[in-house]
Amino acid sequence: MKILVCISSVPDTTSKINFTADKSAFDKNGIQWVINPLDEFALTKAVKLQESQGATVTVINVGDAATEPVIRKALAIGANDAVRVNLDPKDSYSTAKEIAAVAQSGGYDLILCGKESIDYNGGSVPGMVAQLLNQPFVNASVGLDVNGSEATAVREIEGGKETISVKLPAVIAGQKGLVDEKDLIIPNMRGIMSARTKPLQVVEPASSEVKVQGVSYDSVPPRAAVKMVSPDNLDELVRLLHEEAKVI
């Protein structure tokens, strides 16, 4: 079985987010980049299938050369090889199209990814990949078993869980719960050293088509100053909640 795992390079959650002076782009200076956490759940699941079923695991990233340290970490976690599409992605569609092109030529049985990346939180790439490949798609999976040519995925729904069986090839988008957090793999020295020699293929983009273009970015407005109200002054509290906070 051949598994393709899609990974995004995203800012560490502790990073301070800034934009360029003209607010036309994200300022990457001083940012620590990591594997998108939801993609890491998918990668760990793929490595477990590698161990239990002898699957080969390929990771794919759409990005420029700056994403290669993150790709190498994915290789250190346990992927067999990697593909980097040499493109600075501008929207979900261009990203999905490049992933689909690699997946189609590679003949993968299963495509795993996180349900969304924690930077833009669009959540649209996995579904687009499935549509472009005309393959079954299960989103927000918290459980996955593979038996021969069939995959059984579990996803959370309102009030319970839903179990879905699909024929392979298929696209499965996972989230927290796809594997236990304690099972997430921290690369050891052996993994880090072996990652240096594992194949990382760089391919040029198949298309330059972009559907969405970012125009400008704005930071979240700073929080307003806190107003202290005496516990004896309930009339003033009610007035503030009504006239300023507008919550009553």
Image (cartoon, grey):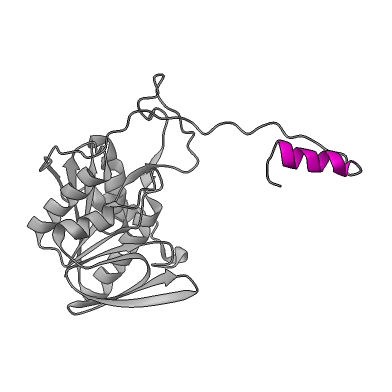
Camera-side residue: 213 or 11?
213
Q: Quadrant of residue 22?
A: top left
Residue 89, x across and y down, in percent: 24, 39
Residue 211, x across and y down, in percent: 22, 40
| Residue 11 belongs to the span the image colors magenta | no
Q: Quadrant of residue 1?
A: bottom left
Residue that appears at 49% across and 34% down: 16
Q: Is residue 168 left or right of residue 22?
A: left
Asked whether residue 187 is in view, the answer is no
Camera-side residue: 180 or 221?
221
Residue 6, x across and y down, in percent: 26, 54
What is the residue that sits farthest to the bottom in this orientation? Answer: 147
What is the residue that sits farthest to the right in this orientation? Answer: 232
Residue 63, x across and y down, in percent: 24, 40
Camera-side residue: 48 or 173?
173
Residue that appears at 84% across and 38% down: 236
Residue range of the region highlighted in magenta in the rendering:
233-243
Q: Is residue 203 above or below residue 143?
A: above
Q: Magenta-highlighted stretch: main secondary structure?
A: helix
Q: Is residue 173 above or below residue 63?
A: below
